[in-house]
């Protein structure tokens, strides 16, 4: 009846772990219908994003408090997704000017296969220590 999930194989990470990466906020339902990545370096830009996604919800999601003198935010909007997803970020390569980050989107496994997948429009907001480099994102094909 019950099975131990510790025995299941995990896919290895694509690149190196990003030190200091912390999930600040996540929600499966937004009004953003296309894939987008953004680096947020100030409170005004963060406020604009929350104003946009809170147009369709009452009460809205609270805007997280971030000290932008120490941290920056990585915003990932996945657009329309069929079924629940999980993401993994890893550093592929880093130079003096830029950091290439791999974005691996995977299906959340369920015990039973569902023939009708719900539609999600998720976003993920990560906090990392302040870097002056350009951040580029690359989606990993599964």
Image (cartoon, rainbow, N blue to C red):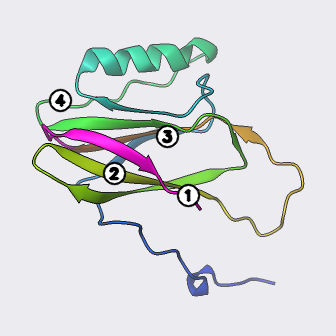
Gap between marks 4 and 2, in whole Å? 20 Å
Of labels 3 and 4, earlier in sequence is 3
**Is 3 located above or below residue 17 in the figure?**
below
Magenta-drawn stretch contains 132? yes
Give the quarter of the figure containing the N terminus.
bottom right
| Residue 88, picture quadrant | bottom left
Q: Is mark 4 in CB contact (under 8 Å) with mark 1?
A: no
Q: How far apart are the two marked residues, 3 and 2, measured between alpha carbons?
A: 19 Å
Task: Return the disc, 3 or 2, that comes first in the chain's sequence.
Answer: 3
Mark pair 1, 2: CA separation = 14 Å
Label 4 vs 1, first from the N-terminus? 4
- SS at badge 2: strand
Question: Which sits in the foreground, 116 or 92?
Answer: 92
The mark closer to the camera, 3 or 2, is 2
Is residue 55 covered in magenta?
A: no
Image location (x, y in percent) of residue 97: 13, 43
Q: Is residue 89 left or right of residue 44?
A: right
Which residue is rendered at x = 59% and y = 29% of the image?
A: 34
Secondary structure state at the residue bearing disc 1: loop
Q: Residue at x 19, y 55 (%)?
A: 94
Give residue 141's mark: 1
C-beta proximity under 8 Å, tags 4 and 2: no
Q: Which residues are magenta?
A: 129-142
The answer to whether residue 19 of the structure is visible from this angle is no
Q: How many marks?
A: 4
The residue carrying mark 3 is 26
Q: What label does residue 101 carry, if any?
A: 2
Judging by the rendered image, the residue that carries numbered circle 4 is 68
């Amino acid at each position: 009846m019950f099975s131990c999930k510790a025995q299941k194989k995990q896919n290895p990470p694509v690149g190196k772990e990003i030190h200091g990466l912390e999930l600040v906020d996540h929600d499966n339902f937004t009004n953003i219908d296309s894939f987008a990545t953004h680096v947020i370096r100030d409170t005004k830009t963060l406020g604009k994003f929350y104003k946009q996604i809170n147009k369709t919800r009452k009460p809205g999601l609270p805007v997280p408090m971030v000290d932008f003198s120490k941290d920056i935010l990585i915003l990932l909007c996945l657009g329309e997704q069929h079924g629940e997803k999980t993401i993994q970020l890893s550093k592929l390569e880093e130079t003096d000017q830029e950091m290439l980050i791999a974005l691996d989107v995977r299906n959340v496994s369920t015990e039973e296969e569902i023939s009708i997948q719900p539609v999600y429009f998720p976003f993920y907001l990560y906090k990392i220590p302040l870097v002056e480099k350009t951040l580029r994102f690359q989606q990993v094909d599964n």
